[in-house]
Image (cartoon, helix red, strand yellow):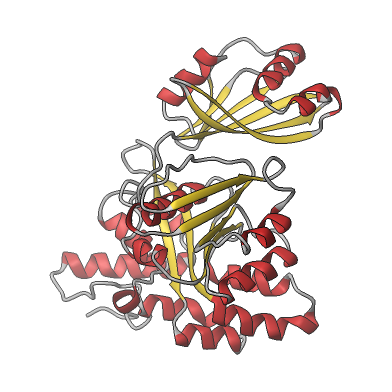
Amino acid sequence: METILKAAVDRGASDLHIKAGDVFRARIDGKLIPLTKQALTPEQTRAIALKLISNEKVKANIDSLLDHDCSWGAPGIGRFRVNILRQRSSFMIVMRVIPFRVPTIEQLSLPPVIERIAATERGMVLVTGVTGSGKSSTMAAMMGHINSSMERHIVTLEEPIEFLHRDLKSSITQREIGVDTENFRVGLKAALRQDPDVIVLGELRDTETIDTAMKAAETGHLLLATVHTPDAQATIMRIVSMFPPEEQDVIRIRLSESLAAVVSQRLLPRADGKGRAVACEIMVNTPLIADLILNQRVSEIRDYMADGRDQYGMQTFDQHLADLVAQGIVTFPTALAASTRPADFELQMSMFQAASRNGADAPADPFAAGATTLT
């Protein structure tokens, strides 16, 4: 198993799939690639699951196990986030590769404004995206920036612990759900009594956790968390809609005051076929955007984000996608498929390219709200 895992990691795999009745598979550049020719038996898959589980109580009850999350690492191979599940009455294992080194904001090619967002004194910073969009890496990079440049106490609540952070300028307390604390809600309430400057949550999953997270932001802490939403507008609407209708007006008030920023991202195949590139949408909660949240005008936020690029470092997905196409990092068809408003994206890009070919003066950003025509 170790030989196969090392080969997958060396090829740049992001995930590995181990399933009874199937071969080893690895997700490389977004595609699920077979690594072996011989299918695994249920007994082999069970033996691998036992090897990956560190909790002796869980091991003892493996035959009644339905779902289990843990982490596993081996010298010279790497660290992995592990999910063990049942399917067709036998085991399947999905392993997410976690680099030993904490990535930097620069290494991930994230916009420089992320450094300023990470340095925020208080408020909620939400990193959003679908599964496999690189949220964990972005959160780790933001933590790394704080750790290397500021004297703060960072408390994390993770399920399981992924990136291992060394104490640099900051002191980092990493707590694993089910091992170091009972659950996210209990751990978050306890974290508020542990003199934190920064609290990092794996995910905002329910109204109680969201309520406590907003309380943490309201009492002067910086709270970093992930949400499984595609963009900034959807994130705000999702959070509000999770609460009963009679509470939503109060939630809008609290969210408009406690939200600091939303960073949404998508991973796209690179034009050269070597790996994937990140496309980011960034919303900074300015007084104007706070007013839009408060007055149920969330649908207007995207246009204000486009306008706030120069002053606040905000950007929409379509703005960043246009940059990636112009730089030759992703192809136009790839960017078009990932765009928020495909028809507008195609029109603006074609007009921008036509103006550039003809030598006309084109706006630096054809996707700013005011740049609707080109001369």
Q: Residue 299: where, in percent of width, then height?
A: 56, 79
Residue at image point 62% right, 64% down: 192
Q: Quadrant of residue 325?
A: bottom left
Q: Is residue 77 left or right of residue 227?
A: left
Write down the quadrant of residue 103 in the picture.
Answer: top left
> Percent from the top left, x then y, of residue 64?
86, 27
Whether residue 195 is situated above or below residue 363 in the rendered picture:
above
| Residue lying at 56% horizontally and 61% vertically, measured from the top left | 230
Q: The N terminus is located in which quarter? A: top right
Q: Can you give x and y, in whole percent of width and height, for residue 124 in the image? A: 54, 69
Q: Is residue 218 left or right of residue 177?
A: left
Image height of 293 relative to 275, above or below:
below
Residue 230 is left or right of residue 183, and the answer is left
Q: Residue farthest to the right?
A: 64
**Which residue is most to the top?**
38
Identity of the residue drawn at 53% across and 61% down:
196
